[in-house]
Amino acid sequence: MAKMHVSTTINGEPTEFLCDATDTLLDALRGPLGLTGSKEGCATGDCGACSVTVDGRLTCSCLMLAAEAEGREIGTIEGLSQGGKLHPLQQKFLEMAALQCGICTPGFLVASKALLDRNLEPTETEVRYWLAGNLCRCTGYDKIVHAVLETAAEMRGASR
Amino acid sequence: MTETQYLAPHSLDEAVSALLAANGTGRILAGGTDLLVQMQAGIVKPGLIVNIKKIPEMTSIEETPDGGFRIGAAVAGAVVGEHERLGKAWPGVVEAINLIGSTQVQGRASAGGNLCNASPAADSVPALVAAGAVATIHGPNGRRTVPVEEVPAGPGRTNLAPGEILVSFTLPPRPPHSSDAYLRMIPRTEMDIAVVGCGVSLTLENGKCTAARVGLGAVAPTVLLVKDAADALIGSKLEDDALEAAAEACRAACRPIDDKRGTIAYRTKVAGVLLKRAAAIAADRAGRA
């Protein structure tokens, strides 16, 4: 069967790609689009390593068909840094060692940014619940949660 | 088997025709949080996937002229959770829908998908049953409406006929001092499947319960409407005796299984406990509504 043609926007750039009907958005990102920052952990929506935003809404790209990206705005980990400058979350994750092996990190960063875009004053509980769909088997979460809270505090300071 | 086709029609009639033409191999794609997992596991290989999210009626929330709400079956949980007026009128329905999965899953998963996936442990269903929600179904012979509790037929099976699509849920108008609550028992604090789920909706007049409905999940092959529990609450001021009678009615209604999440005895006991706690929360909210 002929491939499907999809027109979408990824990290602000109009983008087109070809896919099969059963390809997931994650398949398209990591395959034809060459955006390998989003990781496949479980492929069943449990681990959050493939987290992206779709029209600003946090989603597992493994649980969405590539064809559904038609006409939508997709945000991936590749869009976090701007002009070669790391996003404050990325910088803080480095400073506070909020990663070890790094496989879960893109998902945590995309999810954390989606939280801070909505709420720059999250409580620790809010951060932990928001990130409950992101699994990490190295750090034990504390460093990640603290890095998100520290970033929020810094961004609040910077915006004053 | 031929390759899978994908369609994203803009009308329900197109979607129904496509599903009928697919001759039983068609699957509806709403949030996809169950369908894509089943495809990934090789449990289903659809001949046709029909994405129904381009149909406006399925992805919108409206207030009805009589003061109720119509929730499109494919509205994502996160969108439901952001609707302030819906959350004020039906906090139990909203909290139940928002318990489905993680933030990421909430970005896609819908109450319609939760109902049609037909898990006995579906979180949104006991709350919708307690709310008296009515499902609107569009099919080859037009439209019909059925109470939510009549949609599931058993684990993984619904009473929808071939080509039928669940379109929306209608919640009735709320009298003053009415509210609802949903509680589920899970061994963790997040990201788990209900061992028992209980939804209670009630109306108070001067502290007396004048209307109530109770939905119980994960204790039978389908989510139960427990009329005897509601009857024990109605006419009472939710005194200990009335709550115990309602809890006993819940325990009596249970026909659970033993599995890794809970034993028959445990699920039965917890059903009564959750009834009392959910009724207390609903009553507290109703007192302030």
Image (tube, coloured by chain):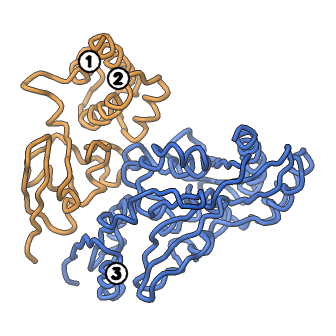
Chain colours: A orange, B blue
- Residue B10 % position (x, y): 28, 71
Disc 3 and disc 2 in contact, CB within 8 angstroms = no
Specify the subunit that label 2 lies on: A
Q: Residue at x 75, y 64 (%)?
A: B226
Q: Are marks 3 and 2 on the same chain?
A: no
Q: Residue at x 14, y 40 (%)?
A: A11
Specify the subunit that label 3 lies on: B
Q: For the residues carrying marks 3 and 2, which lies nearer the camera in this image?
A: 3
Residue position marked by numbered label 1 in the rendering: A92
Asked if residue B158 lies left or right of residue B266, the reply is left
Q: Is residue B196 visible?
A: no
Q: Residue at x 65, y 59 (%)?
A: B131
- Considering depth in this image, is B266 or B122 the residue closer to the camera? B122
Which mark sits nearer the N-terminus, 2 or 1?
Answer: 1
Residue A148 has which mark?
Answer: 2
Asked if residue A110 lies left or right of residue B210, the reply is left
Q: For the residues carrying marks 1 and 3, which lies nearer the camera in this image?
A: 3
Residue A2 has which mark?
Answer: none
Where disc 2 sits, the SS reads: helix
Mark 3: which amino acid?
Asp
Disc 2 and disc 1 in contact, CB within 8 angstroms = yes
Quadrant in the picture for residue A100 = top left
Local crowd at mark 3 within 10 Å, few (<14), some, or many (≥20)?
A: some
Residue position marked by numbered label 3 in the rendering: B13
- Where is B48 relative to B226, above or below? below
- Residue B233 % position (x, y): 84, 55
Q: Residue furthest front?
A: B65
Q: Residue at x 26, y 73 (%)?
A: B9
State the separation of the CA atoms marked 2 and 1.
8 Å
